[in-house]
Structures are given as structure tokens and as C-alpha cells.
Amino acid sequence: MPDRSRSEVAFAAALRVLPGGVDSPVRAFKAVGGEPPVIDRGEGAYLVDLDGNRYVDYVCAYGPLILGHAPAAVVRALELAARKGTAFGAPTELETALAERVVAAVPSIEKVRFVSSGTEATMTAIRLARGYTGRNKVLKFAGCYHGHSDGLLAKAGSGVATLALPDSAGVPASYAAETLVAPFNDVDAVRQVVERHGDDLAAIIVEPVAANMGVIAPAEGYLQALRTLTSEAGALLIFDEVISGFRVARGGAQTLYGVMPDLTCLGKVIGGGLPVGALGGPESIMEFLAPSGPVYQAGTLSGNPLAMTAGIVTLDALAEPGFYESLDARAARLAEGLRDAAGQAEIPCVVSRVGSIQTAFFRETAPTDYVSAAASDTSRYGQYFHAMLDGGVNLAPAQFEAMFVSAAHDEAAIEETIVAATHAFASLRTTAGRR
Ligand code: HOZ
């Protein structure tokens, strides 16, 4: 096992002043045991911890870093932008420039509101849907995660699933009562909810590619069925493309599957590694937002010039011909290598992939919803996770997250990962579990 003594000292100091030692729960390794390496820097496809250990990184900040760590063009642009000032609380041309790029790429979006996180984007989209329709209820799907706002934590994936919390403490029952939950990929369940609550249903919100219970693709026709049912009920369809946007395709999952939502939530990639979220949709709905309309939303650092700059440079790189084809090929090679490595070791493991996001589930067959994802062998995932970390590969410390492949993951990084995985899977045959 690599020496991580400096990380241990730094994490002990963090525990003294930060709850759980972290600012976001998944980082604390609760699901896999042990303590996290404390990071010094990122370089392309690699992370380097305080002890100088290097890891091929598939967390990529949970999605934003589609160009890898510290890409030269983004860093250069940020240096120049910072010299001009880091926040103004007033309009800049940068907001318009990033919005124009989003509108050009995402087919259902005519107007955009920038916020500072994906949580703000989904929270605002829900308020806008309620203001627009004059209705209250929202349907979400078990295992889909839409950030940590009160109304959206019911049966949430990501860290809530990882920590096995039913929901979150601190959410009034009256709030939660406005959120309806159905299983992902089950059209009949949605039909029943619409029949029962259709008159008061403001919106259905869905991750069109689920990525917070591990990566699960929508079943054939599922998104189209959601589109039809919401239109018939007079409710809005909200795609949470915070992860899938500019990731599974330049125009997101709506382009990949050819289904147009009313509202789209974005984040992660559009901020190029800085804090950005956004919601967008047709002008007729977006103009309900203040100051044009009655639905209030605001933010001191919304449209922040540094964040807009990183987003612009990143989206321009993604517009280069062949970008997504090349990313897809690398991710496919990784998935194939992981499948082969698990197969050689006779470990039940299925790799579920959509474009550059994928999850190795420790179970025999690909899950289709939260119940089947949750039936994965999470303790084996924990053993695999630690074997990979010790072998120089950084994965999310939880079964219910995605692996993110970036443009910086070249052939050498991918092959290094497959070698580490071959050793890791082989070790699972003999290791009963050490943590
Ligand atoms: N949506 C991300 C995880 N799936 C957020 C990362 C976090 O919870 O820290």
C-alpha cells in the first residue's frame, strides 16, 4: 500500500474543523472504509496526493472535468479573466457568450438562466414549473439524484443512497408530501401517478441517463413515454442533464435519444471545473423567471466571470470535430478491458456505459432501476475500490456513482487502468475483505 502519511495528518486536521472532514459526504469514504487521500493537484488524467502518489482519476470532480485536470487553454483563459476582476454583480458579455453556446448545442433551449450549482438549477426548475403550471406536485424517480434541495431528496441516489439514508433529516413532511416517487424505467408506474395526481402535477423530473445510482440507460421508448404522458397531463417534463449534458453527446441525452423536454437543468461540464449550474428552455416558459416574470430566483455569484470563462473555453473544445467519437472510443476500450478483467477472475460484474460515463456493478446483470442497482455487492465494490486505489486508480468511493472518462485519458492511462483492474479483480478471488 502506498505511503499516505501526509494525507493522514491533513485529514485528521480536517476532521477537527469540518463535519466528517469533508464538504460533501461521498468524499469521506464512509461506504468503502478507510480515509481519503488528500489531494495536492490534478494533471490531465491524473490526481496527485500530498504524499506524491499518482492516480489515474475517474472521478474527475464527479463530472465537470471532461478535458481532464487543469487543461492549458482553460487555465490560461482563467488567468487573463482573473486579472480583470473576479465578480461584478452586473451583466457581462461572458454570460451571453456562454448562453449562446448552450442554446446552439442543446435543441430544446432558447433561453438560459445561470446559477452556481446543479442543485440550484433543479430547485429553480421545479419552482418555475410550479409557477408556470399553477400546480404543486412533482414526480421524481427512485435513485435519481437532483441535488440536495428539500423537495428533491426523497429516494435520492448518489450520497443519500451510498449512506443508505431513507431520505434526509430536516425535511418537513409537508415538503416531502409534494414529491411523488416512482421506479425508474417503469412507464406503467408513471401512468398510474399521472392518472391519480395529473390535475395537480406540475412536473416530472428525470435524469434521462441515470448516473447517480450508477449509470443506467433509459429503456427503449421510456423517455418518449414520459414526454407523451406529461404533455397529455399539462405538466412539464424536466430533464436533469447536470451529468449527461455535454457529456453523453454535445446536445446531451435529449439529442442522443431524440426526446425534447420542456426544461433542461445543466451543470458540471458547462462550468469547465468552476461552480456553474443552469436551467434552460423555450422563451415562453423561461420568461416566467424574474425580472421578466413572477417566479423569483437570484444569486450573488450567478454568471460569475471566471466560471463563464472556463465554460466558454470548455464548450469550444467540445465543438471540435470528432471530440465525442474519440471520447466514446476511449470509454469503450475501458469498459471492454474492465469486463475482460472481471471475466478472467470470474467475478460477477457488469459494466453499464453510456458514452463517457460508466459503472462497474458488482452483480450478474445490468440493473434497470434503483432496486436492481442496490442489489449489487457493495462490500465487494469496497474491496475493488481499495485494490484499485492502491494500484494507482482513483474511483468514486461508492458503487452508486459513475466513472468519468475525459479527453486527457489517453491510451496509456486507459491501459494502466486495465492492468490495475486485472490485479484488483484477481485479488477479489482471494481477499475476504480487509477493511
Ligand atoms: N452529483 C454528484 C454525485 N453523484 C455530486 C457529488 C457529491 O455529492 O459530492
Image (cartoon, rainbow, N blue to C red):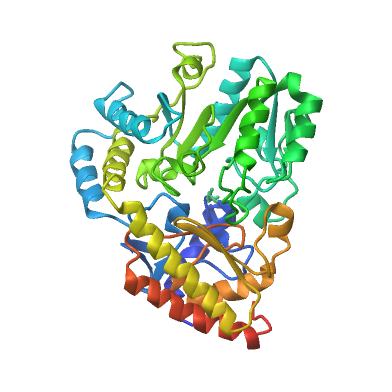
Q: Which image quadrant is residue 80 in? A: top left
In the image shown, does 133 or 74 lie closer to the viewer? 133
Q: Which image quadrant is residue 123 in? A: top right
Q: Which image quadrant is residue 283 in? A: top left
- Whether residue 313 sits left or right of residue 377 in the image: it is left
Residue situated furthest bottom in the rendering: 430
Q: Residue 121: where, in percent of width, then height? A: 51, 32
Numbered marks: total:
0
Quick check: can you spot residue 421?
yes
Q: Residue at the spot x=48%, y=53% of the render? A: 62
- Whether residue 334 sits left or right of residue 151 in the image: it is left
| The C terminus: image quadrant | bottom right
Residue 220 in the image: above or below residue 126: below
Q: Residue at the spot x=63%, y=45% of the render? A: 144
Q: Residue 406: where, in percent of width, then height? A: 37, 58
Q: Residue at the spot x=80%, y=33% of the render? A: 192
Q: Residue 316: where, in percent of width, then height? A: 27, 42
Quick check: can you spot residue 149?
no
Residue 55 in the image: above or below residue 373: below
Residue 106 in the image: above or below residue 166: above
Residue 263 in the image: above or below residue 224: above
Q: Residue 258: where, in percent of width, then height? A: 50, 38
Q: Residue at the spot x=53%, y=54% of the render? A: 22
